[in-house]
Amino acid sequence: MHPPADAPADVVVAVNPTAAFGRHGDVGTRVARRLEEAGHRVTTLVRDDYPTLLAAARDAVAGLARRGGPDDGLTTLVVVGGDGMVNLAANATAGTGVPIGLIPTGTGNDFARTLGIPHGDPDAAADLLLSALASAGPAGGPATVDAARISSAGGERWFACSLSAGFDARVNERANRMRWPSGRSRYVVALLAELTRLRPAAYALELDGKPWETPAVLVSIGNGVSLGGGMRITPDAQLDDGLLDVMVVAPLGRLALLRIFPRVFSGTHVTDPRVTIRRASRVRIDAQNIVAFADGERIGPLPVEVTVVPGALRVWT
């Protein structure tokens, strides 16, 4: 147990709406209790679905932002769940100055992996968060990282880690519907199931205003390094460089994709001549009959325009 905080924080804990049905169903309650025992003022948000929880989180963050300045470290939104909850946190806090605390309990946890936050061990993640809050002040504070803003026909959204718009998005969609297996294996099974539908599409991209038209089977935009539970799609991406890494995979057959695929976990797939990575601060993607996903959440049909916003998020690490 951590000693009571010298400067207690106002903390909102938002819990994945489906968490009650999984093996981490009690984590939100445990985290809230530990924060209270450490002397912090805690409000817990539990709602029946993601849109309702996002609306509640936005309202709560607006209240937190009014209570404390962006540099005092005394307001925090803690999210309990996977990358979908990271996406919720990004959409609730981007540009507000309110820091995010992560308790990763999801399938992928890719944003937490990129930041070095313990994943698969909620108690270790809670220990890290409590220590970070205890050291808030001139000597320590949350890390400042970039976020990506999406503009599309569906409105404006944010993502923290990655956006998929191709075969990878279809794999993501299938994996989201699956209940077995868990972790990285879910994405592998989903990929194998989607291989029968592997077809290239004609993409019209713009990178910082420069057109790039190319056929491809897979297009991803990385603010962070990985997706799908450690698939290092954009292995050299950095969360604080003010740039997005755009990965494009040229048309190839099923067997060729299966040969390249295992290398994605080490990031060495980028040495294959059919894989191209370019960097830009603003990216537009368009293609027929392609749906985009960001941080595992469905965004909607292309086109989308993605703009990196330096320093839009603050995260306890």
Image (cartoon, rainbow, N blue to C red):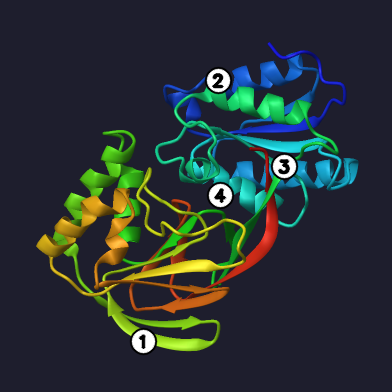
- Measure the C-alpha gap from mark 4 to mark 2: 22 Å
- Residue that carries the numbered disc 3 in the rendered image: 142
> Residue 272: x percent and y percent?
24, 67
Instruction: Tell us which disc is closer to us: 3 or 4.
Output: 3
Mark 1 neighbour class, 10 Å CA radius: few under 14, some 14 to 19, many 20 or more: few
Three-letter code for the amino acid on which mark 2 is drawn = Asp
Query: What amino acid is at disc 1?
Result: Glu
Q: Quadrant of residue 30?
A: top right
Three-letter amino acid code of the residue under disc 3: Pro
Residue 51 at least partly seen? no
Query: Gap in Å between the C-alphas at discs 1 and 3?
Result: 40 Å
Residue picked out by circle 1: 213
Q: Disc 3 or disc 2, which is closer to the eye?
A: 3
Q: Mark 4 or mark 2: which comes first in sequence?
A: 4
Compute the Cα span from label 2 to label 1: 47 Å
Q: Residues within 10 Å of mark 2 (few under 14, many from 20)?
A: some
Q: Which residue is mark 4?
A: 87
Q: Amino acid at mark 4?
A: Asn
Q: Earlier in the sequence, mark 3 or mark 4?
A: 4
Determine whether, in the image, residue 260 is placed left or right of residue 210.
left
Q: Residue furthest top?
A: 1
Q: Is residue 302 left or right of residue 9?
A: left
Q: Is residue 83 above or below residue 281?
A: above
Q: In the image, is 36 to the left or to the right of 265?
A: right
In screen coordinates, is 284 left or right of 108? right
Numbered label attached to residue 123? 2
Q: Residues within 10 Å of mark 4 (few under 14, many from 20)?
A: many
